[in-house]
């Protein structure tokens, strides 16, 4: 698991290889990731958007951008945590993701970006 605090919001990510949804012969590798976020600020924050950078170990790169996470735009009160699970498919056995969440200070209505720590997705048999 990797964690990072930026702009008073802690983001932690844990990854899981999904062998039942992968097909190595077809170069299809599916990973799930669990994101936990905790608001360490003294004000409530709302997550508006996500922006992901996804890298395969073959040098390919793609971006994913959109509103909310898994269909919601959670509001976190001071000290509150939120967690969700999502997934990513790769064409190789290894890759990584990083990105940002656009959030809003609910008191001042000011928008700010929270950095998501870079995390690796590695098929378990490659990690040895």
Image (cartoon, rainbow, N blue to C red):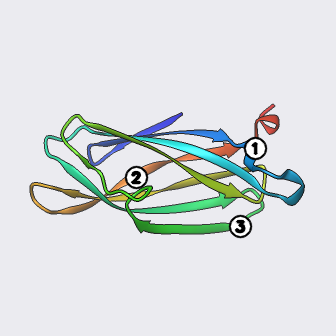
Q: Dot 3, how many residues are within 10 Å of its Cα: few (below 14), some (14-19), or many (20+)?
A: few
Between the C-alphas of marks 1 and 3, the distance is: 24 Å
Label number found at residue 87 = none
Residue 38, compared with residue 91, is above or below; it is above
The disc, 1 or 3, on the residue closer to the chain's N-terminal end is 1
Secondary structure beneath dot 3 equals loop
State which mark lies toward you, 1 or 2: 1
In this rendered view, identify the residue nearer to me: 80 or 112: 80
Residue 6, compared with residue 47, is above or below; it is above
Residue depicted at x 17% and y 47%: 44
Q: Dot 1, how many residues are within 10 Å of its Cα: few (below 14), some (14-19), or many (20+)?
A: few
Residue depicted at x 66% and y 47%: 31
Residue 50, compared with residue 96, is above or below; it is below
Quadrant (top left/top right/bottom left/bottom right) for the N terminus: top right
Label number found at residue 60 = 3
- Residue at the limit of the structure toward the right, as seen here: 25
* Residue 58 place in picture, x, y as percent: 78, 61
State which mark lies toward you, 1 or 3: 1
Secondary structure beneath dot 1 equals helix
Label number found at residue 115 = 2
The disc, 1 or 2, on the residue closer to the chain's N-terminal end is 1
Quarter of the image for residue 17 reads top right
In this rendered view, identify the residue nearer to me: 8 or 70: 70
Secondary structure beneath dot 2 equals strand
**Image-based side of 112 in relation to 126, left or right:** left
The disc, 3 or 2, on the residue closer to the chain's N-terminal end is 3
Residue depicted at x 25% and y 36%: 80
Quarter of the image for residue 72 reads bottom left
């Amino acid at each position: 698991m990797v964690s990072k605090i930026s702009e008073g919001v802690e983001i932690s990510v844990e990854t899981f290889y999904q062998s039942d949804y992968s097909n190595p012969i077809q170069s299809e590798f599916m990973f799930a990731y669990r994101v936990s976020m905790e608001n360490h600020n003294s004000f409530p924050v709302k997550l508006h958007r996500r922006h992901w950078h996804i890298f395969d170990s073959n040098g390919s790169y793609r971006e994913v951008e959109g509103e909310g996470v898994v269909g919601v735009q959670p509001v976190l009160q001071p000290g509150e945590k939120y967690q969700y699970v999502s997934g990513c498919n790769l064409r190789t056995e290894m890759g990584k993701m990083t990105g940002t969440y656009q959030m809003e200070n609910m008191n001042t209505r000011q928008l700010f970006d929270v950095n998501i720590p870079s995390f690796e997705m590695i098929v378990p048999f490659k990690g040895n």
